[in-house]
Image: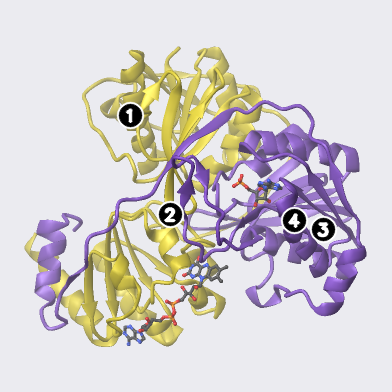
Chain colours: A yellow, B purple
Amino acid sequence: MSVLVYTESEQGTLKKGAFEVASYAKAVASQLETTVTAVAINANNTSALGNYGVDKVLNVTNTQLETFNAKGYASVIKQVAENESANIIIVSSSADSKYLAPLLAVGLQAGYASNVIEAPTNTSPFTIKRTAFTNKAFEMIQINTDTKIIGVSNNSFGLVETTGNASAEEFSANIPDLGVQVKSTDKVTDKVTIADADIVVSGGRGLKGPENWGMIEELANVLGAATACSKPVSDLGWRPHGEHVGQTGKPVASNLYIAIGISGAIQHLAGINASKVKVVINTDAEAPFFKAADYGVVGDAFEVVPQLIEKLKAFKAQQ
Amino acid sequence: MKILVCISHVPDTTSKINFTEGDTKFDTNGVQFVINPNDEFGLTRAMWFKEKQGANITVVNVGGVETEPTLRKALAIGADAAIRVNTVATDGFSVAKQLANVVNDGGYDLVIAGRESIDYNGGMVPGMLAALTNANFVNNCINIEIDGNSVSATREIDGGKETVSTSLPLVIGGQKGLVNESDLRIPNMRGIMMARKKPLTVVEPVASNTETTSVKFEKPAPKGTVTLVSPDNLDELVSLLHNEAKVI
Ligand SMILES: Cc1cc2nc3c(=O)[nH]c(=O)nc-3n(C[C@H](O)[C@H](O)[C@H](O)COP(=O)(O)OP(=O)(O)OC[C@H]3O[C@@H](n4cnc5c(N)ncnc54)[C@H](O)[C@@H]3O)c2cc1C
Ligand SMILES: Nc1ncnc2c1ncn2[C@@H]1O[C@H](COP(=O)(O)O)[C@@H](O)[C@H]1O
């Protein structure tokens, strides 16, 4: 009856998000006075999960699951859940977890709540808080089924360290017919992704053209940040579509979001409002972004950004 | 090829979000409803298949009579027929259950839904529908090509994209990228006239259970005012981000 958490890995290494969902699972387990079991797939070393409240890890090693497959992964998690009689399953909000969770929900006849931002407010009836209307509102929902799946919003719960040991065991699962095969992957591996980033540096149409993104990338580099852009910037082909953030693009829930030359249209703000601290740099003091931001600089990006890079470099050197 | 496009009827992206009845219901007063943007990309891709490879397109919504103008708009864009399942959508699972019934009845080869609806943001209907109908499933789909029964599709992943091969029957969770922004169509007069003559069938719901119940909505706390920093004093910005906001 322990709480089960799916801890994602990439090339055998646990992702940062795995520790956040583990922290969340620990909070739920404490409410229910039970333990936390993690399921990992092809992970090399899972002992660090003990520091985030996991008591036991079941690792599934299988060459058929070397690349992510939603159906295969959902089936493995289902088998572990049934074997452990787990009726609460925690997953993250990564693209992969959001892909597999609905399949798992049908397989386990479980109610699934996505975009959850807090530990349950009540465990009977099981009530949780999620975001809805693209961050324009919160929704309290009850999950009525015996088995429940919670998708935790990235960066909403944070990492909570404890001391403990996670024992590791191998779990052998049956692999179903996968149905979908990966042919090729096109992925930047040396850059922070928007989903994982603590800091996101984002540029808008105010930057005039793709040739001016050098300073955006440099700023991102100094901060260890991911780069993003507004919708027209990706529509114009200045930046790849994967960088488009907002209501119809990727959601951003970083600790710091820096918007440069972005007006702050409602569709843009909706997608980035879950970020904790927002900074805007814009020539127009009337730009709507100033109403949504915590800190603002009214100024020309072409002057402000290079200076900010220098100041930040000096600051980092001091640290 | 028979294509079913799932259409969720959502508040326009510029809508102010308010609630009534003790914050338990979304206040539709003065709100303009549109085709969910992710579904609009999907519908436009379906039109591409119709025009280039030959396909019959049905659009479906699970909802009350108030969603019919949205379905008519999809017909005006070029879908051949519409189905409305006459029940108020309660949760993602119950919607998927109704849609599964429509899919099983109609024998569709390809079901196009959106990655998520911009109101409920559940991101669960397409996957649940695929599981309930035993179809293959590709989420966050930004490209799809079909040759006979074989499918090549591209999906967005964190930090990049991935191309996969699969086969029909298939459900996709689509999004921007399926077609270019500039390919989206605004219904013209002829389309609107023709849409009036196209069939919009109302079917009654099958029995379903509600797995999750919405209890109450809350609006985010109003934000404080912005702290302005002079462009000549960026040291102060660095110091505020470090000492006050504690984010660097
Ligand atoms: C259905 C729908 C969905 C949408 N979804 C999204 C979405 O998901 N994400 C999104 O971003 N948008 C979305 N939009 C578009 C949105 O409405 C805006 O058009 C868009 O966000 C504007 O992008 P921008 O701020 O980069 O450009 P603009 O609105 O052109 O703003 C440019 C800004 O740069 C400033 N500027 C100019 N020069 C400088 C300079 N030298 N230094 C500093 N600042 C400068 C200007 O003052 C201005 O404020 C959507 C629209 C619709 C209709
Ligand atoms: N009531 C509905 N009727 C028809 N399709 C729907 C409905 N709700 C959701 N969908 C489809 O499922 C997708 C994802 O919705 P959701 O799971 O609510 O985020 C939408 O983009 C639609 O394609």
* Chain letter for mark 3: B
| CB contact under 8 Å: marks 1 and 4 | no
Q: Residue at x 86, y 66 (%)?
A: B195
Left or right of A55? Residue B20 is right
Query: Within 8 Å: ligand 2 and the Cβ of disc 1?
Result: no
In the rendering, at what x and y percent does residue A186 appear?
A: 56, 60
Q: Secondary structure at mark 3?
A: strand
For mark 2, what is the residue?
A136
User: How far apart, in angstroms, are the residues tagged by discs 3 and 2?
Assistant: 38 Å
In the rendering, at what x and y percent does residue B207 appear?
A: 76, 27
For mark 4, what is the residue?
B152
Q: Residues within 10 Å of mark 3 (few under 14, many from 20)?
A: some
Left or right of B119? Residue B82 is right
Disc nearer the start of the sequence (3/4) = 3
For the question of whether residue B194 can be seen, the reply is yes
For mark 3, what is the residue?
B146
Q: Are marks 1 and 2 on the same chain?
A: yes
